[in-house]
Image (cartoon, coloured by chain):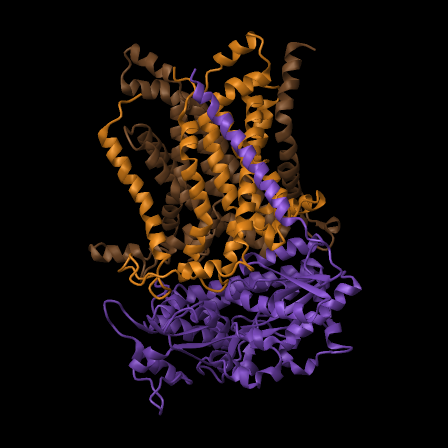
Chain colours: A brown, B orange, C purple
Amino acid sequence: MTYIQKRNVTGWLFLAPFMCSFFLFVFVPVCISLWLSFVQLDLTNAAQSKVVGFQNFSDALKDDLFWKATHATLNYAVLMVPAVLLIGTALGFGLYGMSRGRDLVRGLIYLPGMLNVAAAGILWQWFFNNEFGLINFTAKRIGLPVLPWLSDKAYAMPSVVIMSLWWTIGATSIIILTALQQIPQMFLEAAALDGASQRQTTFKIVFPILRPVLFFVFITTTIGAFQMFGQAMILTGGGPEFSTRGLVQFMFETAFNGFRFGYGAAISWLLFGMIAVFAVIQSIVVRRDS
Amino acid sequence: MKKPSRIVTTFMLFIGLMFLMPMIIMVLTSFKSEKEVMEPSSVIPQHFTLANYSQAIHSAAEAPIMMWSLNSFFVSCATTLLVLVIGSMAAFALTRIRIKGAEIVMNLLVGTMMVPSQLFLIPLYVILSRLHVLDTPWALILPATAGGFGVFMVSQFMRSLPPSLEEAALIDGCSFWQVYWQITMPLCGPSLATLGVFTFIASWNDYITPLVFMEKITNYTLPVGIALFQSSYSTQFGLTLSTSLLATLPLLIVFLVFQKQIIESMSSTGLKD
Amino acid sequence: MQKSGNFNIRGLLGGLAVIVIITGLLRTFLTGGFSASNKVSITFWNGFTGPDGIVMLDIIKEFNKENPDIDVGMQRIPWATYYNKLTVAGSEGRGPALFISHADAIPRLRRAGFVDYADDVFTGDGAINPKDFDRYVLDRVKFNGRFGGVPLDVHPQGLYCDADMLKKAGIIGPSGEAKVPETKEEFLRAMDAATIERTDKQWGYALTVWGANMRAVMAQFDGKFLDEKGNSVLNCPENVKALEFVAGLTKKGKVPPPSNGLGWFGFRQGKVAMVWEGVYMVGDLTRVNSFHYLGGPIPVIGNHMGTIGNSHVMCIRKNLSPKEHDAVIRFVRYLSTHSLDWAQAGQIPARVSLRSSERFKGMQVQSAFAKQIPYVLFPPKTPVIFEFMLQMDLACEYAVRGQKTAQKALDDAQKETQAIIERDRREHPEDYKS
């Protein structure tokens, strides 16, 4: 065996445990859901399900509720992704730049993330409540306008985004901080010795090293945003007038409450298509930069 | 890179407090009576009560809280351990050994992350049923090791490390296993610790999978078990908050106890010299 | 290189491994040791979390004591995810021997193919007499002329009043105590009287679940969901009248604006004097100390008394062994006979004979709501119930928010629901025979 072959064999051995698990618990279910999207599932006997071709997909494209859900999902993603990236990165750099108390603040920022979505959602449902919510109460006290946070179409989605930011931004900040801390000190010292300014160091050295991690944050944030589900489900139930009912909620309810698993699978794959388009655009942009 | 500045420190402390505020309000509210619970005029309870907590716990016979906690610890620790080991090995193969087909595997992995996993519930149920692991902790642990998130994350961190050290070790005659365990793992300490924290918390807070995959009440995890005392019909704010706090409490304790170790491994670069 | 850095992550992994081993051993130690007995074990699933579940657990405990050869094990799953789990488990052949389904969910569940008929409950030794149920309730569980399950309870919507608030507003009867309004005029008067303008405004009445509130009035106008042929008639004049009334309350500013969201919380907080809600909400009120509430039928706004309601139905899984089947039948009969205990949790027994007992009359809200039993409207009996109700609720939302007139909203919903029904007929012709 050549060195390259040996290297490959060892490599695949390293990869094997993960690939086994991945195959069984992700790949197979993904294939099943792909098959589902082309049939009308017969729950009593899955093997006898009727193959309907692209019927489920064309039904979805003609479905008013599908477009409502797409609108809600895009609305959320457009607000959430830039916010997470900007604020998360800023907080990560902020943590890195702290002289004291970094561990404490890191803990505090991540604390909300430890709550389950039900608790976080219920808490904010009360904060946002029109009549006796904390936010409007405080606003009234200090003379700010009282807003119908969750019950008006214009404000409901931003409210969901605010709650989601509080709940999830800690993870992004910590990832950025970790990436900064993992940069070998000697790189930065070398730059300083060469007389590079702080700005130069940041843009010429730190960001290039950070690129893979930033790419990771980009992609996972995008995926996460497009798959938004729990927060809106608890805060608004998808209302008012379905303005916060995203595609995943639509898919989940169609499949599990309406028992239309084939249709649900088709919605999933349409959502997959949307995410993939965004992800490919992002990776092209990131690669062109480098 | 930058000199730590006082302004940044003060600002970040303020931000930290902003994040903490809702949590404090949550704790205070959980001690309020049902009638007082949503009064915004008094964040501090006027009539301090433990009613929400006593209702959450109810009776030991119907609520084997110790058993639920034990299950939660077992599941979360085993998941974290497996995800870290299996995930870092996979990431090592993909980014350090750079096997043939690494690009394809990576794309497949990230691609599958884009399919909403909610739909997998039924196929997973069937697979786990055929493997005879339903209603055992393995039904929660095994599928959690298959997610692409961990491998993707560790891979991206590994990419940002200089390969020079490993190459040197390989030329010195070290095997890949030695390089993985003695050089790459320590170098990736911070990112692995971070991933560990994420995995542990996600596993702890997982709700829908234990609910669907577990049957006997003694096999429930803490968040699922403790939620049984909430009525399905209407939200009882105080009760929901107190049960959530109870379910999160062990998590907080773990992090307080192991804070030093976790933070050290999160922030040690291994290359400080 | 720093030594401690090297140690940390591997130390953390080692530590984790140790914890996994210890907790794993502890688990095996604690869960092991249960030997199989010769009892027949049957599993019973339902969505009775919270106080309901405790009541049900007590009934089961009693049954297990009285029937030493049977062991009923109950599993509670919150309603929000209950049907998901039931479907998944049922189609994989791991479903429970006995489970609760809402009456309107049975047609949908039958599609998953694991629901058996429950005819045996009504025949043989110790049989329950089907005449002891209201006919229209039994009709809900009849499929192909057979019983698809046994109704445990009926839970209609009714009127909850805050007695103290009504009394303060002068809505009192001859005895000087708060009087529960019964007619439209009394109701509107009480609504106005109990509405007080303050900085912290107090309301006489608030809508809760808009769609459900509308359906309560719809029952009073003899409105319908489907005609005899199973076509959607959501926009029939009766329904429009009902929705106009509900939406009109908002338009006239008599109730909190749609953006308010007070509803049930406001009632519990003492900020709303009257609401319409399901009888099962009683359990929620008993927790609030020193709260004087009264129950009554929904005031007559339409042609006669009436409300919306549903039933919890006991359903049996297919492919049980004869022994299990026998045990399940015995348990179903027991539960049905003891449904007064269950009523305590905030339900009305499906058994007519039990409703005339003194004990039931002692449950103020339950017995007051039970006056509406002859006029309870159930959600439509259709496999597309979920999508149907979704469209209807959306129509109510549009009308209450003033985005569409009641007529327009229901016209649109009728078109949508009719399309859904026609699609389902095409996809599942077997369910629409006969």
The quadrant the C terminus of chain B occupies is: top left
Can residue A244 be seen by looking at this rendering? Answer: no
Instruction: Provide residue A156's location: percent of width, then percent of height.
Output: 38, 53
* Residue A18 left/right relative to B244: right
Residue at (47% x, 21% y) in the render:
C6
Count of numbered labels shown in the rendering: 0
Residue at (61% x, 50% y) in the render:
B214
Q: Residue furthest bottom?
A: C174
Instruction: Provide residue B87's location: percent of width, then percent of height.
Output: 56, 29
Can residue C312 be seen by looking at this rendering? Answer: yes
Give above or below for A223 relative to C34.
above
Instruction: Provide residue B27's location: percent of width, then percent of height.
Output: 36, 52
Residue at (46% x, 37% y) in the render:
A222
Q: Nearer the viewer, residue B233 or B102?
A: B233
Residue at (64% x, 22% y) in the render:
A12
* Residue B42 left/right relative to B217: left
* Residue C310 left/right relative to B161: right
Name the quadrant containing residue B116: top right
Q: Nearer the viewer, residue B188 or C87?
A: B188
Give above or below for B58 relative to B261.
below
The quadrant the N terminus of chain B occupies is: top left
Name the quadrant containing residue C328: bottom right
Instruction: Provide residue A33's location: percent of width, then percent of height.
Output: 64, 43
Q: Residue furthest top?
A: B172
Give above or below for C163 relative to C105.
below
Q: Nearer the viewer, residue C206 or A269?
A: C206
Name the quadrant containing residue C340: bottom right
Q: Residue furthest left?
A: A143
